[in-house]
Image (cartoon, rainbow, N blue to C red):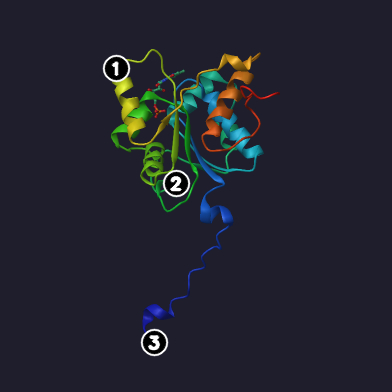
């Protein structure tokens, strides 16, 4: 008998339904643009709705979290099913063979969208986004910057042309928000609409409430 055939067989974990289709998995990226609360709220509602979230946060996102909220980094990470360091380019989400429903970067900085648009994927965040695009899965970028110069606009056009959905976090006043939380929820709900996920956050135009 050949030596190779005597090797004990590796035990491969039986895939769950989610592993096979990826339909229950979403990658959430939080980059260092203003509006870190969108990413946090997204993690909260996806957790409550039973989705498996795979989180990657940039170093700048950790800084904006400290500036914009009282939350600790650990508390945000605890909302996710799995957390990866942004330097871990060998993480599961860096491969297209790891099936997911897609990725949302909330909020998305100009730096991160620029990496994605050019294909210079030097972090796990931009690599995972690039993988989502190459696998023709859904990539939603909540790009936050204002005002925008022509270079930014060209970058956003390129990202859109290669398949990303540019969804800046802009409040819709037709929903008559009374609090910042209302505005955040409506925007998060509209972003989830892009994945056909309805967690009941959106006041829909033309529908009785
Ligand atoms: C409080 C704060 C707010 C920021 N807001 C924005 C912003 O709205 N949009 C943006 O593109 N960059 C913003 N930046 C700058 C980014 O954090 C910076 O460009 C960083 O390099 C982005 O890195 P990342 O894409 O890896 O997260 C902000 C930085 C800080 C500290």
Q: Is 207 above or below relative to 126?
A: above
The residue shown at (70%, 23%) is 208
Q: Earlier in the sequence, mark 3 or mark 1?
A: 3
The x and y percentages for residue 43 are: 58, 34
- Dot 2: element: helix
From the image, tell me which residue sits under label 2.
93
- Asked if the residue under mark 1 is in contact with the one under mark 3, i.e. CB atoms within 8 Å, the reply is no
Q: Quadrant of residue 86?
A: top left
From the image, tell me which residue sits under label 1.
150
Q: Nearer the viewer, residue 29 or 154?
A: 154
Q: Is residue 20 left or right of residue 156?
A: right
At label 2, counting other C-alpha atoms closer than 10 Å, the crowd grade (few under 14, some 14-19, many 20 or more) is many
The disc placed on residue 30 is: none
Q: Nearer the viewer, mark 3 or mark 1?
A: 1
The residue shown at (52%, 24%) is 36
The x and y percentages for residue 77 are: 56, 36
- Dot 1: element: helix
């Amino acid at each position: 008998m050949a030596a190779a055939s005597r090797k004990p067989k590796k035990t491969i974990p039986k895939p769950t339904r989610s592993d096979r289709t990826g339909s229950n998995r979403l990658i959430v990226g939080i980059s260092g643009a203003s509006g870190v609360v969108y990413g946090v709220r997204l993690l909260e509602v996806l957790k409550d709705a039973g989705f498996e979230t795979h989180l990657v946060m940039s170093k700048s996102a950790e800084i904006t979290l400290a500036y914009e909220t009282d939350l600790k980094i650990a508390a945000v990470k605890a909302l996710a099913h799995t957390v990866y360091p942004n330097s871990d380019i060998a993480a599961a989400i860096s491969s297209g063979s790891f099936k997911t429903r897609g990725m949302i970067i909330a909020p998305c900085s100009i730096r991160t969208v620029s990496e994605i648009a050019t294909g210079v994927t030097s972090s796990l965040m931009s690599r995972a986004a690039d993988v989502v695009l190459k696998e023709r899965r859904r990539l939603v970028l909540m790009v936050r910057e204002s005002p925008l110069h022509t270079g930014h606009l060209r970058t956003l056009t390129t990202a859109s042309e290669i398949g990303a959905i540019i969804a800046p976090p802009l409040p819709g006043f037709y929903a008559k928000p009374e609090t910042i939380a209302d505005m955040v929820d409506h925007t998060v709900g509209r972003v989830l609409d892009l994945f056909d996920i309805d967690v009941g956050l959106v006041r829909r135009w033309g529908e009785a409430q």
